Amino acid sequence: MASFVLIHGAFHGGWCFDPVVEILREQGHEVVAPDLPGMGGDEQALREASLDAWADFTADLCRDLRSRADGPVILAGHSRGGLVISATAEKYPDAMSGLVYIAALMCPDENGLEAFHAAAPGHDDILAAMQPEANGAGLAFAPDFAPEAFYHRSPANLAEAAVSKLVTEPAATLASNVPVTADRWGRIPRTYIECTDDRTLDIAFQRAMIGLSPGTQVVTLDADHSPFYSATEELAEALLSLA
């Protein structure tokens, strides 16, 4: 059996993966879907959060699973979570067996905000919805725009519950560069799960990122930016196929 570490995107927590986690565990796989340290914290916690610290945290989870099981350890990230798994893989390439980017930022030469700006004007509304908080240490996402940006094809009850759980994102993490190299990050098998009806990272932007990383396996889902809600079974099936 495989083990999965699922890293959430900006403003979210591990709770967003709950529907997929249930399916993976029913199939006998180990799954960890943590809340990243500092998310939704006070000013000090937000300022202390960093991609480097998140990479350490994530690698520890991968190593713990590897110590308890013989199967592959699959590290997956959604949206901004793509920056986290890239940073983890570059720093600790032996901690995981494969990488999965779920409608995620896979930016070899740019940080997350630079990538959004490069895709403008299509993403200007997303950038405008990110509002500084906690003396500039964090960013909050406008709740009235979240359903349109993240969940427009997701079940209404799940979307409503998700909006109520969104938290402040550490500002520095989204604006951090993740330099990756061919002999570390590049040696790990990777899959990109693209979502064709994504309004946060539109499909053209996703495919542009894929084009910057030759050798990436691609799975296509007809889903919004939150396939764990809008295409739960299909996302779980894609992850299970990698196990």
Image (tube, rainbow, N blue to C red):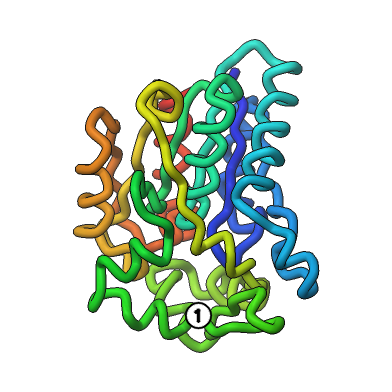
37 left or right of 123? Answer: right
Q: Nearer the viewer, residue 65 or 179?
A: 179
**Crowding near the residue tagged with mark 1, few <14, some 14–19, many ≥20 C-alpha atoms within 10 Å:** some
Q: Is residue 110 among what the camera can see?
A: yes
Q: Which residue is mark 1?
A: 130
Q: Is residue 2 among what the camera can see?
A: no
122 left or right of 90? Answer: left
Residue at image coords 71%, 33%: 61
Q: Position of residue 144 (x, y in %)?
A: 51, 88
Q: Nearer the viewer, residue 43 or 6?
A: 43
Q: How many marks?
A: 1
Residue at image coords 36%, 64%: 114
Residue at image coords 77%, 69%: 41
Placement of the N terminus among the 4 image quadrants = top right
Residue farthest along the top direction in this orientation: 70
Q: Nearer the viewer, residue 171 or 102?
A: 171
112 left or right of 142? Answer: left
Q: Quadrant of residue 60?
A: top right
Q: Quadrant of residue 224?
A: bottom left
Amino acid identity at mark 1: Met
Q: Position of residue 48 (x, y in %)?
A: 74, 60
Q: Is residue 141 above or below residue 61?
A: below
Label 1 element class: strand
Q: Position of residue 88 (x, y in %)?
A: 56, 37
Residue at image coords 58%, 64%: 172
Q: Position of residue 97 (x, y in %)?
A: 51, 21
Q: Is residue 13 above or below residue 239?
A: below
